[in-house]
Amino acid sequence: MTTIDDPEWRDNPRLNAWLTEGRDGFPAWAELTGGGWDFDTGSLPRLERTVRERFPDREQAEAARNEPFLTAAAWYFGEVHVRNYGALWHCSPEPAPHAPGRLQPLLRLPKEVLDEEEAQELAEAEELYEDDFPMCAALDTVVAAAGPPAGDRLAETLEGYAFWDSVVDRALDLARTRPGQNRGSRPRPDAPGPLDPGRPGQDLALWLAIREEAFPLWARATGREGELDFSERSLEALEEVLRQRVHTLGLADKLDHMAAVERYRIAHLPSVIRLFDDPVFDCALWYLGETACRARGARWLPLRNNEDVDAETRPRLAVALIDRRIGPRLELTAAVHRCLRDRADPADCYGSLRAALSVLGRTPVTPAPVRSPSG
């Protein structure tokens, strides 16, 4: 039995015939739907509306999944992934025994462009069924876009590439040096399209809202309320608050252990010491991220796969500048751990909170006014 990683999944009669049908039917489909289809990522909301206008509900679209209209629509949708992100078409060379007439064209980045560390990380995640390597079922996704509720389902499929931006670069470089899987399938000259990770998931949004509401009380409790104004300068005061808190809690000799707990995601083990279980550090993590957002124009990144914010996932919280690319990102817990190191020992990897913002690489902007809990 072959798997999706075998070469046969990229080149077989079932896949090639479907790609040919979609490509050859596209010109007539494009004329029927008003023309102007340029394979840009910005065309996906229009594609979704076009499918929904043709099929008022998903049941009708499912019944027509093998007809020329949806074949061309799904081919176009997939080619947006191919031409903007370097994805490749995949399809099982053999029909599934339980559904012999059901074709499932898939899109995924080529694994051969992963470096050694990325490949190892992905293999470990796959063993746990926790990988988030971008993959999309083109025809199923287009069929699911039919009927209410209206949304941005097709465009949201691009968000998964945001956390693999360097892999996208390599996939596009590889695609430019070899023939496409079907005629005319080449990366766009301005590819890749925007790599935007999307809105924070519901759980992260709630975490942010609760800490914003608690901020006035937390700031008063630190004794530095007048200095915590979300300016970059205020991070010097925050660092002093955190260093003092470590000594108050008697954790100064446990920093290495706590950093390892956060880095290697072993917070689920019993009796481990977790720095961010302490409310002072927990709110400080939010304050550091908010300062980066307000003073540098960064934005909170959703957790991968919109996971819940908890003891195990909190170390992955980050903010980033969003431009055409997802942009440079600041890993918040790592920055907090560095600011607690021994300033006098260059080998101890000390880094100030204020200096941590330099990774964002943008001239500071005027801080936004402190928002009230009510918004």
Image (cartoon, rainbow, N blue to C red):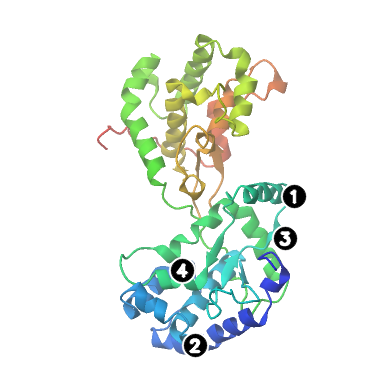
The disc labelled 4 sits on which kind of residue?
Thr
Q: Which residue is mark 2?
A: 27
The disc labelled 3 sits on which kind of residue?
Glu
Disc 1 element? helix
Q: Which residue is mark 3?
A: 112
Answer left or right for 208 relative to 140.
Answer: left
Discs 1, 2 touching: Cβ within 8 Å: no
Q: Which residue is mark 1?
A: 116
Nearer to us: label 4 or label 2: 4
Discs 1, 4 touching: Cβ within 8 Å: no
Q: Position of residue 33 (x, y in %)?
A: 39, 83
Check the picture and name the quadrant holding the C terminus: top left
Nearer to us: label 2 or label 3: 3
Distance from Cα at disc 3 to Cα at disc 4: 26 Å
Q: Earlier in the sequence, mark 1 or mark 4?
A: 1
Residue drawn where x is 49% and y is 70% of the image: 40
Q: Earlier in the sequence, mark 4 or mark 2?
A: 2
